[in-house]
């Protein structure tokens, strides 16, 4: 299927992804899991959760291979790769720049996928690792949520979820996953990660930028909050060419700042996020400043 693993698409903590082709000439991405840890919970999670889904904004699992300790997952192929490569290059003169309108459409698509996971499935799914690396883009730049290795399934009547250990990627993990003092773990943990990701999409950079000497940090959510709070006309962001794009950027910032509220009860549901993204900018209130300061620099990097 992969022609002896000829074309490698990516590498992550889970293993490697290779380009493949089925007999009917459909292209696929084959995710070969590295040596399975413990009882292979990540593999079981992924098959169990994605196998239950069917939505335009969730990547389709075509099948899986299980041979002894060797495990692989076969997904539909996404020609534009991950969102990561399009947003972090926006500060450069890269040809991979995508416009503000398309960025907004991608943000809406991801929110729709999350709404489906939280409300539309017969078994609710908490993803717990929403970040640009795990959002794949098809040929039309339609976003699809992928990588369900950390996902948690829960029944419809459950509003809070018990967790035996922290899951996620530093820089996107909700405070309540660090400490229950911040609140119960629920679908609002995904909303927090989504908010951090939206702010990175707007800023075209990681939320935490550590200087070469590792002593100076600029925490993007605090920096951009000040500009929105003072109603500054110019947001100081790259690539805004007209008033309409300025409105899109401002709307995405306000939504992102609501999503990263420290107390989960103050964050909107993903359904409300969709309403805000698709509604009128004038109707949006500026949220309180998220009071968590930036995490330590060591947490700023996002392992794939």
Image (tube, helix red, strand yellow):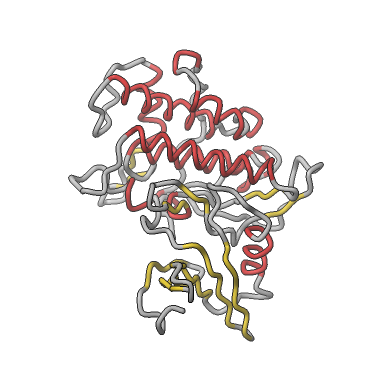
The residue drawn where x is 61% and y is 48% is 178
**Residue 277's x, y, as percent?**
49, 28
- How many numbered dots are placed on residues in this image? 0
Decide: is 151 above or below 288: below
**Residue 233's x, y, as percent?**
29, 16
Q: Residue furthest left?
A: 93
Horizontal placement of 206 versus 112: left or right? left
Horizontal placement of 117 versus 250: left or right? right
Decide: is 167 above or below 260: below
Q: Nearer the viewer, residue 284 or 29?
A: 29
**Residue 202's x, y, as percent?**
36, 35
User: Residue 91 lies in what quarter of the image?
Assistant: top left
**Residue 30's x, y, as percent?**
48, 71
Q: Residue furthest front?
A: 24
User: Residue 251 lies in what quarter of the image?
Assistant: top left
Q: Nearer the viewer, residue 75 or 182?
A: 75
The residue drawn where x is 56% and y is 26% is 275
Horizontal placement of 221 versus 86: left or right? right
Decide: is 239 above or below 22: above
The residue drawn where x is 30% and y is 41% is 98
The residue drawn where x is 60% and y is 30% is 267
The C terminus - image quarter: bottom left
Decide: is 176 above or below 53: above
């Amino acid at each position: 299927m992969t022609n002896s693993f000829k074309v490698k698409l990516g590498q992550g903590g889970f293993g490697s992804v290779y380009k493949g082709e089925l007999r009917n000439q459909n292209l696929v991405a084959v995710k070969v899991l590295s040596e399975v840890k413990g009882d292979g919970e990540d593999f079981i999670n992924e098959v169990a959760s994605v196998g239950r889904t069917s939505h335009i904004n969730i990547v389709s699992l075509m099948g899986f291979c299980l041979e002894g300790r060797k495990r692989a997952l076969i997904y539909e192929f996404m020609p534009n790769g991950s969102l990561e490569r399009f947003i972090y290059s926006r500060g450069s003169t890269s040809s991979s720049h995508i416009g503000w309108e398309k960025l907004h459409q991608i943000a809406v698509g991801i929110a729709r996928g999350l709404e489906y996971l939280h409300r539309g499935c017969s078994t609710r799914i908490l993803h717990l690792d929403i970040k640009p690396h795990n959002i794949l883009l098809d040929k039309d730049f339609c976003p699809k949520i992928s990588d369900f290795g950390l996902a948690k399934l829960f029944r419809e009547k459950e509003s809070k979820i018990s967790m035996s250990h922290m899951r996620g990627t530093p820089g996107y993990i909700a405070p309540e996953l660090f400490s229950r003092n911040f609140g119960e773990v629920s679908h609002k943990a995904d909303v927090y990660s989504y908010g951090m990701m939206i702010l990175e999409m707007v800023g075209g950079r990681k939320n935490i930028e550590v200087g070469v000497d590792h002593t100076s940090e600029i925490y993007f959510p605090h920096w951009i909050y000040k500009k929105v709070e003072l109603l500054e006309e110019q947001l100081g962001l790259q690539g805004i060419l007209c008033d309409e794009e300025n409105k899109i950027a401002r709307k995405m910032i306000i939504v992102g700042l609501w999503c990263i509220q420290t107390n989960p009860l103050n964050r909107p549901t993903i359904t409300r996020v969709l309403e805000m993204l698709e509604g009128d900018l004038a109707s949006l209130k500026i949220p309180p400043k998220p009071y968590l300061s930036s995490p330590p620099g060591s947490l700023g990097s996002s392992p794939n």
